[in-house]
Amino acid sequence: MSKEAILVLETGHSFIGESFGHKGETIGEIVFNTSMVGYPQVLTDPSYANQIIVFSYPLIGNYGIDSERLESNKIHCVGVVAREFNDYKFHWNSDKSLEEFLIENRIIGIHKIDTRAIVREIRKFGTMKAIISTEEKDPFVLVKKLGVYDFNYLDLVRRVTTTIPYEINEDGNKKIALIDFGVKRGIIRELLKYNLRIKVFPAWASFEDIKSYNPDGIVLSNGPGDPSNVPYVQETIRRILKLERPILGICLGIQLLSLSVGARTYKLKFGHRGANHPVYHVDSGRTFITSQNHSYAVDDRTLPPGFEVNYYNLNDNTVEGIKHDSYPLIAVQFHPEASPGPWDTKYIFDDFYNLIS
């Protein structure tokens, strides 16, 4: 049953709407996603940990939830904002409604509010803290609550990484060490198409543990938060580079790789989240439409000698990929596995497989 709810931004702007999903109160960093479809994958992407997601597309929920298409075993965002929420699961393969899924994961949603105004606010002032409440309705009280929270130094990777190593497809033909910073199932699914044997390591795995597996290639996965809050992986990645084994870095993976060689990262004003981001590939001169989800980017001015930017974002000219003149590495800021989004850049996995073969 719906209940009146309020969304209050750090700027003090408030929006009254109706709740769906769990009832209560939630605080997080508010961001927006421009994808027209794919909300089940978005909600279960570990990169959204501690964030409230505003869906700019005006309707979500109308095809329910297909548990086979989720990117992890739970919802990782802390709140959902929509123009209109529909609880009818019209898709033949859905096994539960969106509201059932939100309640199961204790996630609060708010709808029947002006999401275009919220997106404009985020674009103007940048990502910020926000609160959704079905209990306290006084915006002044809620803004004061936001002042207590500081998300700048959170190590969100520790919340989403596996706690123990595990192996997938033990009879595979090549060994891959995948360092899990919050990996999406879509990445693992794509790797398995090449019959690869994959060992998934926690984010804090030591270089010795990874080396002892004797992998043919290493994958640095996607994940949430500020890469500078995960300093314990930088020395590990530096030593992995010296093995000169093929490396594939995706999203947070490219940022951590860049930090490990002395480059810097910085926070974007409102990030890239959606399935329609145009990326220019310098080597081929082609443009690809990509799926993206990140708040931070690599500062190309700080990359050391030997590294070169080979992908740029055409909207804001930020770094979308780097390569090295001698190390066998592929590192991209976008998501070649999509989930959700276009498959234009799935060739990235072909290129990685060719390196390890």
Image (cartoon, rainbow, N blue to C red):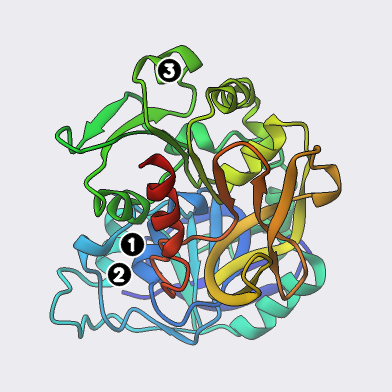
- The CA distance from mark 3 to mark 2 is 45 Å
Q: Which residue is mark 1?
A: 102
Q: Quadrant of residue 71?
A: bottom left
Residue 243 against residue 140 in the figure, above or below: above
Q: Secondary structure at mark 1?
A: helix
Residue bearing the label numbered 3: 211
Q: Residue at x 49, y 87 (%)?
A: 58
Q: Which residue is mark 2?
A: 99
The secondary structure type at the circle numbered 3 is: helix
Is the residue 116 above or below the residue 313 in the image? below
For numbered disc 2, what is the local secondary structure? helix
Foreground residue among 213 and 253: 213
Q: CA distance from mark 2 to mark 1?
A: 5 Å
Query: Is 305 placed left or right of 5 in the picture?
Result: right
Residue located farthest toward the right when viewing the structure as drawn: 301
| Amino acid type for the residue under numbered disc 3 | Lys
